Image: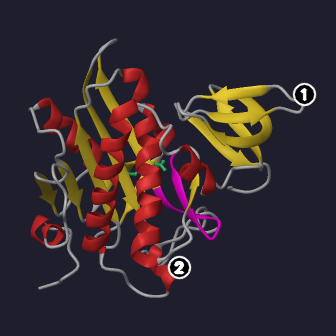
Amino acid sequence: MNPDTLAPEQIQKHLHTKWLGQHFYYEESLDSTNNRAKALAQEGAAHGTVVLTEEQVSGKGRMGRGWVTPKGSSIAMTCILRPKFPPQRASMLTLLMGLSVAQACQRQYQLDAWIKWPNDIVVSGKKICGILTEMNAEAEEIHDVVIGVGINGNLTDFPENLRQKATSLQKELGQTILRAPLVAAVLETFEENYEKFCIQEDLSAFMETYNQILINRNRQVRVLKSGETLEGVAHGINSQGELLVEKQDQSMVHIYAGEVSVRGLDDYV
Ligand code: BTN
């Protein structure tokens, strides 16, 4: 039997969590783990349910973009959460998951993993992971949030348009990785971070660690939001997960981690 599958029994061998991943939903192929997670949440799936697949045939990225997950080579995973905090706080979960993935990669492989605010994990200046958070909420109450994580595991090649800005764990480590232990490490790290997050319902406990591995920090960035562009130097995040950008006139702008895109002036980071 192929030891490198994302089947629940493979993950459970490595998993030491209290509630995250107590229920798994796994299929060899799905359109998108986020779509399946949203449907399962509608049907009443428990807080902490995790959806995994070997292949996505219409994986989704941010800003309406696609996300490629070829069979058996990557990690496509979505966590279903039912937080008690107000909907306005949910965007911080993307940052919390980003931090958890970076910490899990550091722990598992001693990799120098960085965060590109708000939702990319970067190794050697190239993207290794993207996160897509989707929420089902009313004004005051969250019904469910799904946090989708796509990690480039054993991908060996990328389409021409991604080659300059995407990489994989296999490329960076020079060897094939086993995906199940990494999934378990990400879930364990996120569970621990989430419990800490819920005490203050913000990122004050994580700001220092987060800002240390924020690749945008002290760099010129271009922020694109709703057709508008802003340029300045990124100084790090605040306790609400907003990116603080100092414009040329020295005014400080707080950027909310919604549907924004952040780039270096010439490069991806
Ligand atoms: C991005 O960087 O644009 C976000 C990419 C998010 C991809 C993951 S893969 C698992 C989950 N299911 C999806 O359809 N998308 C997310």
Residue positioned most to the right: 249
Q: Amino acid at mark 1?
A: Asp
Q: Residue at x 80, y 38 (%)?
A: 232
Q: Residues within 10 Å of mark 2 (few under 14, many from 20)?
A: some
Q: Earlier in the sequence, mark 2 or mark 1?
A: 2
In the depicted structure, whether residue 89 falls above or below residue 111: above
Q: Quadrant of residue 236?
A: top right
Q: Inspect this view and state whether residue 86 appears.
A: yes
Give the main secondary structure, helix, strand or loop, of the magenta stretch: strand
Secondary structure under tag 2 reads: helix
Q: Is residue 195 magenta?
A: no
According to the picture, the residue beneath numbered tag 2 turns out to be 172
Magenta range = 119-129
Q: Amino acid at mark 2?
A: Glu
Quarter of the figure with the N terminus? bottom left
On the image, the x and y values in percent for residue 129 come to 46, 59
Eye-nearest disc, 2 or 1? 1
